[in-house]
Image (cartoon, rainbow, N blue to C red):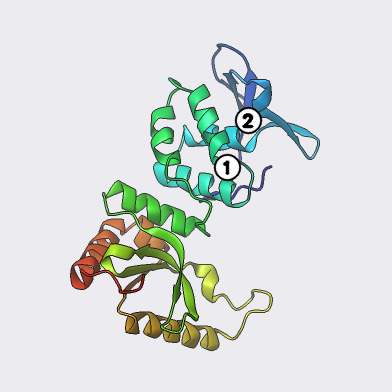
Amino acid sequence: MHGIVVPAPIADRATVTADAERGTVRHYPTFDLWPSRLPEHHRTVVNGVRSVTGARAVIDEGRHTSPAYQLAVADSALRLQRTAPAELDEVVTHCTGWPGIRAVRRTISHADGRRQSVLESVSYAAFLEFGLPLPECQVPIVDDWNDLIGIVDFLWRDHGVIGEADGAMKYRDDLPGAQPRETRLLAEKRRQELLERRGFVVVRWDWRDATVDKADLVRRLEAAMRRSRQPIPGL
């Protein structure tokens, strides 16, 4: 209803929050009814339908999902301006002591609307899970003449390492106005060469790397940090 992007297909069942101090969850053929305290400022109307606010939707969803899912939903809500950090913090505080809220609190503290895709969000969740030094997100990199080389997904500034999360959409041929695939591949190759000339080590990965093979991804990034070791002058 809020247009917030989620990491998986939308469930075929709805979860309906009913304002109640206590009660049991009731299961119906197409939805589950959850009794829960629902103050007025956690309510809104979307296209004529009564709903919880974007912030409350993010926190309620997060209490029943994995950290990677929580972060992807929170990042999307911030990116699309369906909520704000202060609103998320308020809902988390309101829900103190509720099942699952402690994990959500930890994850939400890292939510960042600058991340541009679900893949970037689940990648960042993997960095958190494995204790990797945390990168900056969506950082512009310029050449010696201060001309923009590109905006990179992740930058480990102190290590001189760039991370690029390559989603399937990046090279699709059916997007409106898309250049030929070969042109985009050559442009990306040129961009990486320019970054490497600046002294960066560039590590690329896809969805499988960030979800199924995330331990291997973290090892690749750690190896890149050992190779580089030095921050890049001028950054």
Quarter of the image where one finds residue 56: top right
With 92 as the anchor, is 225 left or right in this view?
left
Looking at the image, the residue that sits furthest to the top is: 22
The quarter of the image holding the C terminus is bottom left
- Does residue 100 appear in this view? no
Please state the horizontal and vertical placement of residue 6, each as a whole percent of the image.
Answer: 55, 49
The residue indicated by pointer 1 is 11
Q: Determine whether 73 is above or below 199 in the image.
A: above
Percent from the top left, x then y, of residue 86? 55, 36
Res. 149 mark: none
Per the image, the residue denoted by label 2 is 31
Residue 149 located left or right of residue 220 = right
One can see residue 186 in this view: yes
Q: Amino acid at mark 1?
A: Ala
* SS at circle 1: loop
Residue 20 lies, with reference to residue 102, above or below; the image says above
Which of 222/31 is in front?
Answer: 222
Q: Residue 217 placed where, x, y %?
A: 29, 62
Q: Residue at x 52, y 49 (%)?
A: 75
